[in-house]
Image (spheres, rainbow, N blue to C red):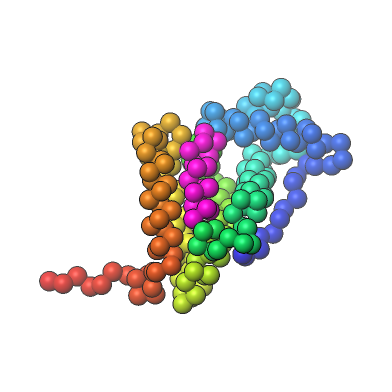
Amino acid sequence: MNSTTTIARPGIYARGTETVDTILRAALDLLIDEGATAFTIRRIAARCDMKVGNVSYHFPRKEMLVQVMLDDLIDSYSRLLERTVRIPAVPAEEQLRLLIVLCLDDIRGKRTTRLFSELWALANHSDFVADRVRIFYQRVHDYIGEYVALLNPALSPEEVHTVALFISASMEGTTPFAGYEKPWAHKMPALTALAAKSLVELAKTVTSRDIAGLPARLD
């Protein structure tokens, strides 16, 4: 897995940790419940019953909140993977299947469906947020790529990343269709079963030629 520089939480000091955590919870809840358009320092301060100055002391820009939220999320997902997926006695193929199921089960929840939709919306208008979202997903692709490389050692590192990106995109693509309260949410268990079967098989059998592109069309 590629390493990513961990940036210390802004504003944290010995007696400020509880305050910072309160602000972060309020910011996360606001983004989930009210969306990107409501994501302002003023609205976050109101939600956690603080003065605007108290919030901006720790987080002068709302982008800093996004940075810390995503850092915290990747840390929490990493710990979850260590407990439930990265089990030494479990074969790599089964670990990849477990990872796919975990990701799709997570998409069914309110937090993930709404949070990441709103983060992408913020990323459309902020290069900083776009870069933080990219770093987050690069970590996800690295996790998936570890299993692709183990299951299909003939692939080059660039091809492994392409396959990992495809697997990630395939899972993320279910969000607007079958995520929390979406039109086909009731079909997510079936979609998860199909994804676990097809994406693991793809990781095992895809070739460099497949990745290079479709064959020329016959006239």
At 49% from the left edge and 52% from the top edge, which residue is drawn?
100
Magenta extent: 97-113
Q: Does the magenta stretch include residue 107?
A: yes
Residue 112, percent from left and from top:
53, 39
**Does residue 177 sit above or below 54 in this rendering?**
below
Q: How many labels does the image show?
A: 0
The quadrant of the picture occupied by the N terminus is bottom right
At 43% from the left edge and 67% from the top edge, which residue is drawn?
204
Q: Does the magenta stretch include residue 56?
A: no
**What is the quadrant of residue 218 in the picture?**
bottom left
Asked if residue 94 shows in the view, the reply is: yes
Name the outermost residue toward the left: 219
Asked if residue 125 shows in the view, the reply is: no
The quadrant of the picture occupied by the C terminus is bottom left
Q: Is the magenta stretch mostly helix, strand or loop?
A: helix
**Does residue 153 sit above or below 178 in this rendering?**
below
At 42% from the left edge and 47% from the top edge, which residue is drawn?
192
Residue 150, percent from left and from top:
53, 70
At 71% from the left edge and 39% from the top edge, which residue is drawn?
60
Residue 171, percent from left and from top:
44, 50
With 66 as the anchor, is 167 left or right in this view? left
| Observer-nearest of 121 and 179 | 179
Name the outermost residue toward the right: 14
Residue 216, percent from left and from top:
23, 73
